[in-house]
Image (tube, rainbow, N blue to C red):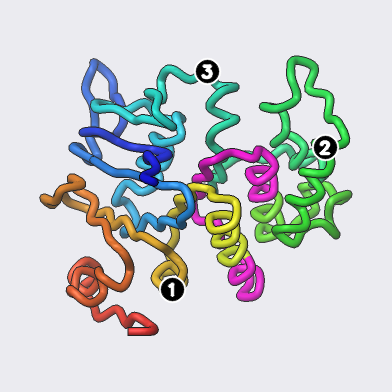
Amino acid sequence: MFLPPSIETRSLSIGYPLRGGVRRVVHSGINLQLFAGGVTCLLGRNGSGKSTLLRTLCGLLKPLDGEIILEGRPLQTYSPEERASKVGVVLTDRGFPGAITVYELVSMGRYPHTGFFGKLEEEDHAVVRESLEMVGIAAKSDRMLAELSDGERQKAYLAKALAQECPVILLDEPTAFLDVTSRLETWETLKLLARVRQKAILLTTHDLESAIRTADLLWLLPETTVTSSSGPVLTGKPADLATDGTLDRFFGTHIPFVGL
């Protein structure tokens, strides 16, 4: 049975509005599809527009042109509450409320499901506990956010996204600041969420080796516009992009693919 994409972009232009009605277009003509059940990695050099694309897909930035379809509906037709129940977001440059505990932060992920008063029922607490366990931060659940290391704080925000129980999870550098063991555990968690829970997962990363080894699809975002069916973004399975030389050309060096 053919499943429609969780997120689809149609002739999407991303960038920023400037003063006087001027717009800074980062990329245009983007046609992409993100499907449930897989991990997709967005790769590119610093300044190529990865974070801009991610923020546009989750609604933090408005498209300059084109359309984003989220589960069959235009993204702009969702209320903030509806969008929060569909898309979980983990960003790297977020501010954080240091005066709350890890458990309280992760509990915030349940608010799209708790109604007007935000009262957590036992089933909500069960989801919070499970999310903390999945990312390996349960032992720190009573600690204040301000007391955590950068890597531990990253895990806490990932747990919050999991607690939202969204069909789509977008992550900006989720393995940044993590030690080797935590980094591997995070990749395994994302893969498990995609395979077992049928999440649609998109993340940016500079961990090229892990992306090639783990991702189902790669989106390659160049610094300058190229021509392809997906617009400026080159897409494909890691093995295919490695064997046809696309990865080597994109990064300007030989990229080995383990398993070829």
Q: Residue at x 28, y 24 (%)?
A: 18
Disc nearest the viewer among 2 and 3: 2
Neighbours of disc 1 within 10 Å: few (<14), some (14-19), many (20+): some
Report x, y in % for residue 106. Answer: 74, 42
Judged left or right of residue 128, residue 9 is: left
Please tell me the numbered disc located at residue 64. none
Q: Quadrant of residue 42?
A: bottom left
Under circle 1, the secondary element is helix
The residue at which mark 2 appears reads as: 123
The amino acid type found where label 2 is placed reads Glu
The amino acid type found where label 1 is placed reads Arg
Disc nearest the viewer among 1 and 2: 2
Count all numbered tags in the image, as a single digit.
Answer: 3
The amino acid type found where label 3 is placed reads Ser
Report x, y in % for residue 234. Answer: 23, 56
In this rendered view, identify the residue nearer to me: 18 or 177: 177
Residue 100 in view, yes or no: no
Q: In the picture shown, does residue 253 fall above or below 97? A: below
Neighbours of disc 3 within 10 Å: few (<14), some (14-19), many (20+): few
Contact (CB < 8 A) between labels 1 and 3?
A: no
Q: In the picture shown, does residue 244 fall above or below 229? A: below
Report x, y in % for residue 116. Answer: 74, 15
Q: Residue at x 39, y 34 (%)?
A: 56
Identify the residue at the far front of this view: 1
The residue at which mark 3 appears reads as: 79
First-in-chain label (2 vs 3):
3
Q: Which residues are magenta?
A: 157-185
Please tell me the numbered disc located at residue 213. 1
Q: Residue at x 40, y 36 (%)?
A: 57
Report x, y in % for residue 178. Answer: 62, 66
Identify the residue at the far left of this view: 227
